Image: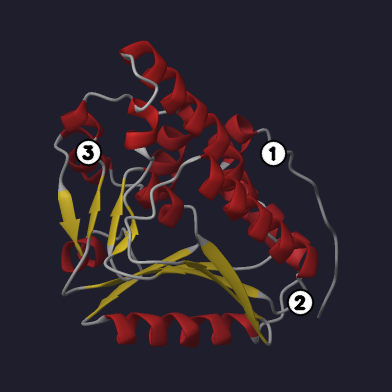
Amino acid sequence: MCTLEKRGNLFILTLTGEDQHRFNPDLISSLLDLLSQVKAQATCGSVLITQAQGKFFSYGFDLDWAQAAGSERGAAKRLQHMADLFKPVIATLLSLPMPTIAAITGHAVAAGFTLALSHDYLIMRKDRGILWMPEVDIAVTLPDYINALFKEKIGDASVRRDLFLRGLKMKGDEAEKRGVVKAAYDGEAEVREASVCLAENLGKRKWHGEVYAEIRKGLYPQLSAILGLSHKVYAIARL
């Protein structure tokens, strides 16, 4: 379902396989386990890259698993269960003591888009893949932590309106132009190369990981509060 590779100071978390990488309880548990390993092994100069195989970064929650409950009420309960399980994934990424990069080489939809946006930097391809929040089309409301994430990560209200209230399918060029991603490149290889290059440059700074994480949490106070993340003060002089 997902793997973790360590290359020097770089951690590369990969959603494996050619499927849609739908988040169900098993995949969410695997993600949390690997992120815990990343956090436990972090040192000054560590950087995380999250990527996926195939044409999908992730298509969001596993709606087939939810609907397998056999009733509308049962499906709603399973969907809420996945949203509750996914919340610690976002909390872990927000508090991870290192820079984080999402290398988006395919479609990032709903919770898949949310996972990507939970990283510090998003790098996307131009020739394939969309960012899409389809909840308005499929009649599903959003958890409070996802609303807070998009509100604090995407400052332009018109962009949030188009994503949430129009169900806009945003391609790489537009995502770069409107400030949703750091950069967009022509193909998969270019995205992966740019992600590694950025990670290596960030890693050279050898920032204090816990300080980095606390500064990040301070940037997103509403999201941190919803996720239950406390904010600590560090005073470490490195002049």
The residue mark sitting in front, 3 or 1, is 3
- Using a 10 Å C-alpha cutoff, classify the residue at mark 1 as few (fewer than 14 neighbours), some (14 to 19) or many (20 or more): some
State the image coordinates of residue 228 (x, y, percent, origin top left).
67, 33
Residue 229, which numbered label?
Answer: 1
The CA span between labels 1 and 2 is 22 Å
The spot of residue 160 in percent (x, y) is 27, 41
Dot 3 or dot 1: first in sequence order is 3
Which of the labelled discs sits on residue 134, or is there none? 3
Work out whether mark 1 precedes mark 2 in sequence or the reverse, and give the earlier one.
2
Q: Residue drawn 51% across and 27% down?
A: 81
Mark 2, Cα crowd under 10 Å, few <14 / some 14-19 / many 20+, is some
Q: Is residue 9 left or right of residue 57?
A: right
Q: Determine whether, in the image, residue 129 is placed left or right of residue 11.
A: left
State how far apart marks 3 and 2 are (Cα).
38 Å
Q: Amino acid at mark 3?
A: Pro
Q: Is residue 168 above or below residue 14?
A: above
Assign a secondary structure to mark 2.
loop
Depth order, front residue of 198/238:
198
* Residue drawn at x 61%, y 71% as measured from the top left: 4
Label 1 sits on what residue type?
Leu
- Can you tell which quarter of the image residue 102 is in? bottom left
Please provide percent x and percent y for residue 119: 50, 59
Mark 3 vs mark 2: in front: 3
Disc 3 to disc 1, how far (Cα)? 28 Å
Q: Nearer the viewer, residue 231 or 163?
A: 163
Residue that badge 2 annotates: 44
Give x and y (percent) for residue 152: 44, 43
Dot label at residue 182: none
Q: Earlier in the sequence, mark 3 or mark 2?
A: 2
Kindly identify the residue that appears in the image at 21 percent across and 37 percent down.
161
Type of amino acid at the residue the image marks with label 2: Cys
| Label 1: which secondary element | loop
